[in-house]
Image: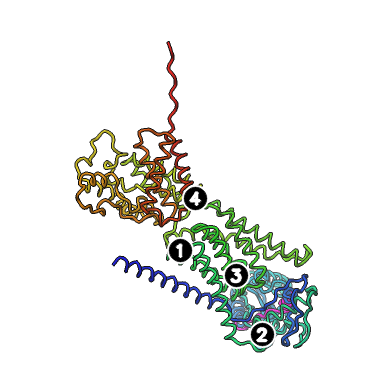
Amino acid sequence: MNEDKRVLSKYSHKLFLTLIFVLTVGIVFMLLPTKTKFRFEFQKGKPWLHETLIAPFSFAINKAPETLNIQIDSVKNQVKPYFLLDNQITENQMLKLRNQFDQQWMRYQEFSSLENKDSLKQNYIKLFHQLYGKGILEQSIDFHPELDGKTSLIIVNKELAEEQLLSSILSLKQAYSFLTEKIKSNAEKYGSWEFAQKMDYSELLAANLFYDEKQSQKVLEEALGAVSKTFGMVQSGERIISKGDLVTQHDFLVLESLRQAIEQGRGENIQLWVITAGKILLILVIFTLLILYFYHFRKGYLEGKRQMTSILLLVTSIVFLSAIIVQTNLVPLYIVPLTILPIMLRTFFDSRTALFVTTVTVLLVGFFAPNGYEYVLLQIVASFAAIVSLQKLHKRAQLVITAFIVIVSYVVMFLTLELIQEGNFMDIDFTPLKWFAANGILVLIAYPLIWLFEKMFGFVSDVTLMELSDSNSPLLRRLAEVAPGTFQHTIQVANIAEEAIRKIGGNPLLVRAGALYHDIGKSENPLYFTENQTSIENPHNQLSYTESAKIIIDHVIQGEELARKYNLPQSIVDFIVGHHGTSKTGYFYQQYKNENPDVEIDESLFAYPGPNPKNKEVAVVMMADTIEAACRSLPEKTEESLRNFINRLIDGKINEGLLEESDLTFADISLLKKIFLEKLINIYHVRIAYPEKKN
């Protein structure tokens, strides 16, 4: 039955990996553009290294982007914005003027002999018509961005469009000042200053000129549409460039035009199914390389669902984000913080995996990235710099330093390529530098992403391991209070194991944290373990051997329960359940066997539930735990006795098969014996006795 379950589990795991790889390949296939790819690489100012190129079909030569942008800017400056003159507002305000004038005149007649009412009224009407005829803006010209750099505008009055100088257009504030000056001047002529002061001019003034965005945009688009994006033609069969020729500015534009024509499918005899088949082959080749890498160098990752799922999710996310940026073309592709990928992989896996997976991802994105060679080179250099600079993520400041190094890497490589291509420092376009800076800032997103992946996939980062190793954490604080002997034992094991794993290669932070928590279950029944017994009677004296064995074995089970309760990561739980593996409680098992030589023993009553260590970190803690605890029983601790004792204990683990599933080598075992001996000599070193004074 167990064998059937194991086989079923094996096949279900293979099915899961197959499905997730197929799903990833499908997503990447949909993201990659279905278009032909120009097969020649070229750089301006460098020799053409390929065979003589003949035009496969006729195509237009596109203008250089900078030339086209200058022409577009010129057109934008020449096109006048359109403003609508609202005559209804003008009529309403003129009606208000007449009514207010008549009302004020009736009041004015009570104490004035002014008789030239009609003449004065017509003067007011003429003045207001003059203002409203030119148009009044709500705010001054400075508050209208559509008028920046303009000297005139187009005013649409009913069906008539007329150009008007900006200098003649008034805002409400300017119109009020203009009106009061004119009224004051006319008052001297007509002797009507007292009457003029009674008029409420703020009520009579209103904006009647408004920006017509729709018409302005339409005219601008028509003008831009008339700008030619090309400046010549290349005929089919015409020689474009010969092998060895330098790629001049003109050659560069011709080659770029041919590349765009081919990639946009404007060439002849282009079949979509052929392109699709090629794209499928490209993706399959790249993902086959990825599978082969894991199979030959990191087989353990293939055996874990969480590991492969997280890696493929990161790769797909980067490809997806890059494809969206390229398709929308709103910002350059360099804004995508691709170096987050190696940072995440380096944090949860290892440097080699981070570099290989990043390279594969860069190759995928480089397939559709503009200037593919330049893009791939920049990203690989920046990713390598990120991996090297982030050896261990112990502090938040390290990520900031890595982001800075990434920016520097981008800038240095970009300037290097530009100097080679342009040959003149003054001709370099420094615009991309701001995108590199933005990219480096976005790299800081990796910090919350690390936390998110820890929660999603049960991973553990170096920062989390540092936090777990704090002796003030709830579980360790409780262990120190209720089982002080066990707590001191775990500290010694942590020191020994950390030094050992550092020298044979592994994760010292993981080993230290795992060692500190491996015996956490002893806090439930601390007095049943010798290191916590002082002067009291041993409680095992009142129990049978099987009962004592069960209590001892239960510290593993209870430790796992506590770890789950306090949400410790799985990598720490592995130390708790695996530090004894499937070994037996030696003392009680042997005692029971000695006292019952003729009884068939149920060995499961004395065996730990396991599993055996799956990696070198847990295996090292297992050996360090056994050696540190057992060495206390040695009556004489000399170098020779310690060496023989360590050899016997470790060889016993090997003979029991407890280390078979770990990835320890014979060289590692030999080195571990030496390291354990050195550490124990330092721990149990006995000072020499001083001679007594003779009489």
- Identify the amino acid type marked 2: Asn
**Amino acid at dot 3:** Leu
The amino acid on which the numbered mark 4 sits, given as a three-letter code, is Ala
CA gap, disc 2 to disc 3?
Answer: 60 Å
Separation (CA) of disc 3 from disc 1: 22 Å
Task: Using a 10 Å C-alpha cutoff, classify the residue at mark 1 as few (fewer than 14 neighbours), some (14 to 19) or many (20 or more).
Answer: some
What residue sits right under mark 1 in the picture?
307
Q: Which residue is mark 2?
A: 157
Camera-nearest residue between 655 and 619? 655
Q: Residue furthest front?
A: 598
In percent of the image, x 43 and y 24: which residue is there? Answer: 689
Question: Is label 2 in a helix, a strand or a loop?
Answer: strand
Q: What type is the residue that disc 1 sits on?
A: Gln
Give how far across and how far down residue 211 sits, in percent.
63, 78
Q: Nearer the viewer, residue 500 or 277?
A: 500
Label 2, label 4: how far apart the Cα atoms are: 93 Å
Pointer 3 residue = 363
Image point (30%, 50%), residue name: 584
Which mark identifies residue 667? Answer: 4
Q: Which of the two marks, 2 or 4, is nearer to us in this view?
A: 4
Instruction: State how far apart marks 4 and 1 are (Cα).
Output: 28 Å
Quarter residue 55 falls in: bottom right
Query: What x and y, as percent, mark residue 98?
Result: 61, 80
